[in-house]
Amino acid sequence: MTKHDIVECIYGKYQGTLTRNVVKDIVTSVFDEIIREMSEDGEAKISRFGTFKVAERNAKQARNPRTGEPVMIEDRKVPKFKPSRYLQNKVNNLPVDDMKDEDD
């Protein structure tokens, strides 16, 4: 599913109430807020969906697969996602407790 698909799905549900451009702006704003929260606090939790975190990777020495020459890879940060128990159960077609609204 792409961002465009999300916009079209939401637009289809609210057609006549919201314009496609407004829906696109809302979806973009949600993604921008997740990115901002991750870059500032290192974590963004969304109930019943999951947690986006920033993990740190240490520097390491690797090899260029073509030449075999050693290459140093610097420290870096990488985004990670941990799905909530609710999302995990939905994906696996397991029963979900709709009353709970918490992440793992």
Image (cartoon, rainbow, N blue to C red):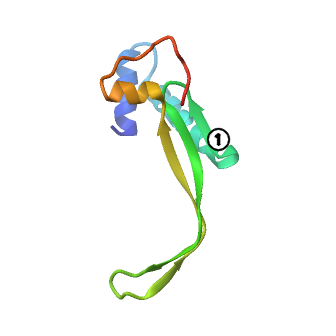
* Image location (x, y in percent) of residue 33: 60, 37
The answer to which of 76 and 27 lies nearer the viewer is: 76
CA neighbours of label 1 inside 10 A, class few (<14), some (14 to 19), many (20+):
some
Q: Does 48 appear above or below 36?
A: above
Tally of marks: 1
- Secondary structure beneath dot 1 equals helix
Q: Does 74 appear above or below 48?
A: below
* Image location (x, y in percent) of residue 47: 55, 25
Quadrant in which residue 8 is drawn: top left
x 35%, y 17%: residue: 95
Quadrant in which residue 32 is drawn: top right
- In screen coordinates, is 1 left or right of 62? left
x 46%, y 13%: residue: 98
Q: Residue furthest top?
A: 99
For the C terminus, the quadrant is: top right
* Image location (x, y in percent) of residue 71: 49, 82
The answer to which of 59 and 79 lies nearer the viewer is: 59
- In screen coordinates, is 51 left or right of 91? right
x 30%, y 23%: residue: 93
According to the picture, the residue beneath numbered tag 1 turns out to be 37
x 40%, y 82%: residue: 64
- Amino acid type, label 1: Glu
Quadrant in which residue 41 is drawn: top right
Q: Which residue lies furthest to the left in this view?
A: 93
For the N terminus, the quadrant is: top left
